Image: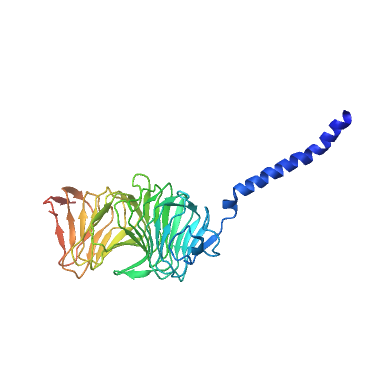
Amino acid sequence: MRDHHFIRRLFWPIRSGFVGWLLALLCLVTSSTSLFAAVRTWDGGGGNGNWADPLNWDGDATAPVANDDLVFAGSTQLTTTNNIATADISFNSMTFAAAAGAFTLAGSRITLAGNITNSSSNNQTISLSIILNVTTCTITTNGGAVVSGLNESVTISGVISGPGGITKEGATYGLRLSGANTYTGDTTVNAGVIMPRHATAWGNSASGTVYLNNGITVADNDGQNRTLSNRVVVTGTVTIAIPFSGGWDFGLAGVVSGTGGFSVTGDTNSRAFTLSGSNTFSGGIAVNDSAARIVMGTNTALGTGAFSTVSTQSAGGLECNTALTNVANAMSMASGKRLNIGGNNSSAVTLS
């Protein structure tokens, strides 16, 4: 009996070690979709645009799985559809390669745990919806194309939701957001052009803050008027560009703060840039060679900085759309510009 117990004690570590090894192997097998995630490159070889067709991807063996990095390359089957059966399948990143054609990504919603990069010379359209499962999704526009006078790179028309935020990088080219977005993180624009084509393009206005940083441009050319309600922080000089054709009336209804200001350019049709928050930004507003109307909706709409016009356009100027008192900003008006104290609603303004 003693020898029997001795033998059990002798071989127990081996036995328990084998069980542990077996359990580890089982975990390895069941989690293989994560551990063996890969970079998958679209080649369109399946003769259709379906993501679930293995022949459309490099290797022709399998379709992408969760946590893969997707690369869209070439110019075959540019209209694609996510028909992968896994609901809200998560991918690490999406990249459009340098030689990529103008893709359209449609179909079922995905979850994104990383970034989007366009390195091609074409505008890329993402019409499927995206859940942001990352603190910040960096969208980098390294390339793009001129569309109706604007340098465009990535258009996302699907709804962007989730707890994450967006950071726009990449000089020159633009990011257009045209979905009814609900994401709750911040939106930071560090370079290039941002084109908000929906009242909630910049996500949930109750939670996220929009950071517009020095040298960036806010623009669009669809001729539609829209006002965004997000909190905005400006640094340096932010350009509000109203195209000479297809212009728009653009408004910021949330509080605008920060050390920066706005330069308004490009309009010949007296379109409006309306500020209606209790603003504190200190960099002022300069209307540069534009016929745009700057419309004040509050006493502090212009922040604490100066208002000036330097323009050869005969139209445009400063006006209000409600009764205002004690507007304290320093003002410099170019010859021929108007100070319309009645605005469009025949309301009065008192300057101090």
Above or below — where is 170 with respect to 304?
below
Residue 302 visible in the picture: no
Split into 4 quadrants, where in the image is the N terminus?
A: top right
Considering every residue shown, the one lying at the far left of the view is 346
**Does 310 sit left or right of 341 as displayed?**
right
Q: Residue at x 20, y 61 (%)?
A: 271
Where residue 181 appears, as percent x and y from the top left, is 35, 50
Q: Residue at x 43, y 64 (%)?
A: 48
Q: Residue at x 30, y 60 (%)?
A: 262
How many labels sit on residues?
A: 0
Q: How is the image coloured?
A: rainbow
Above or below — where is 191 with respect to 185?
below
Q: Residue at x 47, y 67 (%)?
A: 73
Where residue 332 appears, as percent x and y from the top left, is 21, 62
**Does 345 sit left or right of 286 as displayed?**
left
Where residue 292 appears, as percent x and y from the top left, is 21, 62
Where residue 204 appears, as percent x and y from the top left, is 35, 47
Considering every residue shown, the one lying at the far front of the view is 47
Residue situated in front as seen by the camera: 296 or 140? 140
Residue 187 visible in the picture: yes
Residue situated in front as seen by the camera: 215 or 129? 129
